[in-house]
Every structure is written in structure tokens, then in C-alpha cells.
Amino acid sequence: MTGTNKKEYVSYLDEPGKYKGIFSWIFTLDHKRIGLMYLYAIIVLFFVGAILGLLMRVELIAPGETIMKPQTYNGIFTVHGIIMIFMVVIPGLSVIFGNFFLPILIGAKDVAFPKLNRMSWWIYIIGCVLAVASQFMQNGPPDTGWTFYAPYSTTTGTNVIMATFAAFVLGFSSILTGLNFIVTIHQLRAPGMKFFNMPLFAWSIYATAWTQLLATPIVGITLLMLIAERLFGIGFFNPSLGGDPVLFQHLFWIYSHPAVYIMILPALGVITEIIPTFCQKKIYGYKAIALSSLAIAGVGFLVWGHHMFTSGMSNQALWFFSFLTFLVAVPSAIKVFNWLATMYKGSIDLKPPFLYALSFIFLFTIGGTTGLLLGSVATNVQVHDTSFVVAHFHYIIFGGMGFAFFGAIHYWLPKMYGRMYNIKRATIAWGIIFVGFNLLYFPQFILGIQGMPRRYYDYLPQFQTGQVISTIGGFILITGLIMMVYNLVQGVKTGEIAPSNPWHGTTLEWQIPSPPSVENFDEAPVIKANPYDYE
Amino acid sequence: MEIHRDDEASKLGMWLFIFTELLLFGGLFLVYSVFRAKYPANFHEGSLELSVTIGSINTIALLFSSMTIAMALSAIQKNNRKLSMQLIAVTLLMATVFLFNKYIEWSTKFEHGLYPGSPLMPHLERGDLLFFSLYFFMTGLHALHILVGMVLLTMCFIKIKKGTLTFQKYIHLENGALYWHLVDLIWIFLFPLLYLIT
């Protein structure tokens, strides 16, 4: 892996550090190496989660028992949720690309607290180990769903304590990363870079970091209370002991709804980076996009009640939460319209990152508009806890955050490794993933409206056609994913040497060699008033 | 890589961390208010069971320790190492007094069988059960924060002794003191909520 195209510089991948071999990674303070370590961990966990998802799809191909017992199914959908939510999509973009590119995009040499950054990674790995271990311990994997709803979670005999503790540990890692990024953005911007000269990915990371910081402690204390309840029979959330299960739902969603924005905001940021580069045009509405990130993060704190329309709330609370939910659609739509306006009359280049960005807009719009259906009280009551909800959040999380993630890796891989993947193969893989994704999740919208509940092991025969199409989509999707990863790995190993600016981007990361040197900038970077200045 | 030092950044980081701590306890305060509204009579009886005297002594001890740690910071800024170390020692002493009183309070409750997981607790009225559970959960989590604060301040003490914390480089003590004030502040909320409101 030597991508040197200058003689005097040494890439961060070849830098001889204090430690040798694997320890040069585990004990590194370099934000780029830490970003890559997160990348490897998350790819492994993503495939574990994806295979669990596929097992569920196979089970649902026919009514009745197909390949597993009901209790196994309960364990599998819980573990799929815990892995995908807490270990893949919540950290996802922000720890990998935030770590790698945030300091570079703002012209810094590293994050503000490199040691804390390394510690966050360690804590993350400890959390992952605990979570995975909870699946194999004596009492069997937790079967509560990733939401750990009380009172069932306070009474089930499975490994809920270990799984919730793992979620607590992962949350701690998330808080420390968010804290690090906020301080980095405040203190380490290159001279001359004001807040409104920052690339928009940095803005989205900034909004995300605040959400991580302010929302995660609430779920932390909630999970601790749940653990204490199980250990000592306290009864905070158990009605037979005087507690209130709806209170648990409130506390859980006060975090877990903002967590949705922790997932999606960096994705919106990535798309905002990709679009101007592949249109060779200045981003339209820079300030509107930057501030809409903060608006999404802010309003996102006030809408948690829309997860609980059927749990028992006053009518005032219902319309209030419903109204606020509709309000979130405004800043999201501002972004979409600005992206479309950026493309208008641009010189569009349909390379894989841009294809992912385009399909992101398509899928995110479907996910967003079906979200409005769920946000309005009258329709929500009909489709609550059906597979319509499952389809909706997979369109947002996978079709949104997942596709943005794939877009980001195709966009920045040449910078990270100094090598280029096979563009043709990447385009084919994108096509397979896109088709597979829609085949997998779109039928679930229809099934949900017809009344198929989520998390059910068995179903009525009339749902089978949709379930079979969905399962076929799952297999197509996983084929595309394997092809994509194979192509990227081949690219990293044996791909052509990539130039320092293969896509003709204008942000700071394209001004330095690929892969970057340890210090990122050998001379002070030139800061432009608008980071997307193509004129 | 060159050694990079930015005290402003460290302080900002500490403030952000303090936000997260406030929200952590904020969740507990929320739970407390919900159950207080649901079981006002039991919460009234429960708070009568707690000793306002010990609670007041602890409040004074913590307020005093906040003052001494602020003075310790001023002392090191004026390059008075010895005074600074003495003041940190007084702070740690006050923290020990606090924990000792807490131990006495908790052990009386244990003798009466009023602790989470005891055989007596499930037979109490629901509101009493929740009050004493919350009491142990909140003061327990707070005591844990006291312990963490004591470790941080002890580390500062050792650093001053070794000469790595000086009047030119006192950010660790500044952050330690900030954290100590937070621990104090949380107690200022816990004391009336649990002991005084009847």
C-alpha cells in the first residue's frame, strides 16, 4: 500500500510510529488510522447484522416454521436491531468519515483530543464485545426488540442486563466522540476559516455531535434504571410494582428519536459534499443547508412522542407531537431542493458516488414522505407496529444512511488509500444493490397497509406473495453488497494509483496528496470564502 | 507529532462533559417528578424518614469543599504549591466526611430493611417503594460521582507534588475543580428534592 507520488512525504499508512505491527494501529493517535479501525469494525458488524436480517427473511418466506423456532426468531430480530442501530448506523458515518475527514476539511492536523479519540474507539470495541457476548451467554439472546420496552424487558429471563449495559457503554463512546468533534470545530479551524467557510459535511457533523452529546445521557440513565430494576426489583417501569411502562417509552425515545438524526445528519452532509463535486457547480443555498442541519437537530429533540401515538397520551400531546413532526420535514426538504437546484445546469458526471447520492435522494424522499404518513395521528393508528413502519425506517436508515455510507466510501476511498477501485464494477454493484433494496423493502409497505404486523414469526397465507418478493430482494441485495465490498477491497489492494484529486473536488482534502501524510498539511492550506468555488 | 496543548479546548471539553452529566441526572429528576406527582402522600412520608440534620451537615460540607477547591486553584495560580496542596487535602477531607455521613444514613436504612432488593420492600406501599428506590439510586449515583471527583483531585494533588502541575500549567486542577462544583451542584438539587420537600 504505497501511494507515494511525491518523494519528501510519507503517507499515514506507512509512517513508522512508536509501535510495530497491529499495535501501531491499536495505540495510534492519528485520527485517520482511528477512522479506518472504526471502518473495519463496522463493516464486520454490518455483515453480521445483514446475515441475521437475511435469516429473518428466509424464515418469513412461508407461513409457519421454516428454518427456526419462534424464540430464536425473537432473539434474531433483537440482535439484528441492536447490532445495526447501536454499533453500525449510530456511530457509522460520524466515527469513520467524521474522524478521517473532519480535521482535514477544516484544515487541522488532528482532532482536539487525540487520546480521548483513541479511548472512544477502545470503549466502542468493549461495548461491541459485550453486546456480542450477550448473545451467546447462558440465558439466551435478549428477545425484547432493540427498544427494550418495559415491562417485558424487566421480567424476561434472557440476557437483557448485558445487552443494555453494552448499549450504555456504546453510548458513552458516542458522547466522547461528539464532545471531541464539537471542541475540534470550535478550536482547530485553520486560520481564516470561519464557521460559514466550513464545508457542509463539517456542519452536519457539528449538528450531529450536539445531538450525541445532549441526547445520549438520557438513554444512559434509562438503561441504568432498567438494569437496577432487574437486579433489585425496584419497579420504576413495572406497573405491578407501581411503576410506569409508558415513562420508559418516553425516556427511551427522548434519546432514540434524536438518535435517528445522529444517523441521518452526517448522511445528509456526505450527499452535500458529493453533489457539487460531480456537478462541478457551486452548492446552491450554502447557508440554508448549513442552518437546516442545526434546525433538524434542534426540532429533532421535540418529536419523540410520535413513536407513542398508540401508547396512551393526552389529545393535546398527540396533535403537538404530530405538528412538530411535520415541522421536521421542512429543513429536510430545504436540503433536497437545494441539492436539486445545485444539479440544475451542472456538468453532471455519473460516477458511482454520484449514483449513490441520486439514489439516496430517491429513497430518502420515499422514506420521508411515508414518515409523514406515520407522523399524522389518524393514519399512524392504522399502520402502527406493522411492517409499514419497518419499510419506512429501512428506507430512511438503509436507503438513506446506508446509501450515503456507500456513496462516501466510493467518494473518499481514493483519498484514504491512494488507490482507485474498478468504476465499472462499482456501477454494476450499485445497480444490483438499488434493485435488491427496493424489492426487499417496498413490498413491506403494501403488506403493512394490508395489516401484516412487525416482529411476527408467522402470518396469514394472503401475505405470502409479498413476503416471497421481499426475501428474493434480500438475496439480490446481499449479492450486490458482497460484489461492492469485493470491488473496494480489490481496489485498495491492487487498484490503480489514484491522483490526489480524481473527482476535481474543491474542498481541502483534495488539495493534499493521497493518502494524506500524518500531519495532513505540510504547508498551511488556502482557505476559500466558499468551499465549493468552481468559478 | 509535535506536542499540542490547548487549555481553552480542554476547558470547553470539560464544560461539554458537564452538560452530559446534568442531563444524566436530569433524566432522574424527571422520573422523580413523575412519581412524586403520582404518589404525593408516600413521598411526603418517605422524606420524613430522612434525617435533615445529616443532610444539612453534608450540604455544608460540600459547599465548604467547593470553596476550598476554588481557593486551591487560586493558590496554584499564585504559585503557592504548599497552600494549594493543603486546600486540596481539606477538600478531600470534606468529601470523606460526606461519604461517612452517607454511610451512616444508608446503614440505618439497611437495618430497617429499607433498601432495594430487601425482603421488606415488595410489601411496602408502591409509593414508598419508589421513594426509597429513588433515594438509593439518586444518592448512590451521586456518591459514585463524589468518588470519581476524589480520584481526580487526588491525581491533581500528586501532580502538584511531582511538579507537573504548576502555576503555568494548571488546567487539570481547573477541570477537576469544575467537576467538583458539578458534583456539589447536583447535591444542591438532591437535598431539597429528597429531604426538604414534604
Image: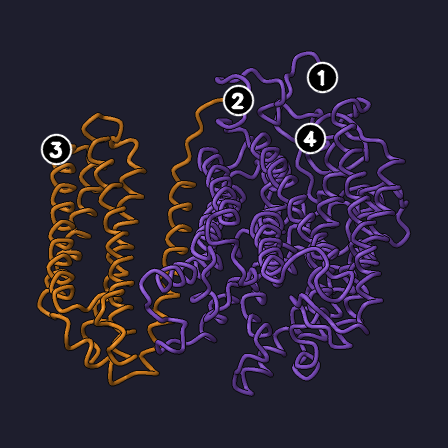
Chain colours: A purple, B orange
Kindly identify which chain the residue marked by label 2 belongs to.
A
Residue visible at 47% across and 69% down? A150
Residue bearing the label numbered 1? A4
Image x and y of residue A113, in percent: 46, 36
Q: Chain of mark 3?
A: B
Q: Could you say which is closer to the camera, residue A170 or residue A292?
A: A170
Mark toward the viewer: 2 or 3 = 2
Give whichever of A92, B161 is nearer the camera. A92
Q: For the residues marked 2 and 1, what is the alpha-carbon distance in whole angstroms?
A: 20 Å
Judge depth for marks 4 and 3 and give the one in front.
4
Above-or-below relation of A28 to A377: above
Q: Secondary structure at mark 3?
A: helix
Q: Residue furthest bottom?
A: A315
Marks 1 and 4 on same chain: yes
Spot occupied by residue A183 in the image (x, y as percentages of width and height): 48, 44
Q: Which amino acid is tagged 2? A: Ser
Residue corresponding to mark 3: B82
On screen, A329 above or below A121? below
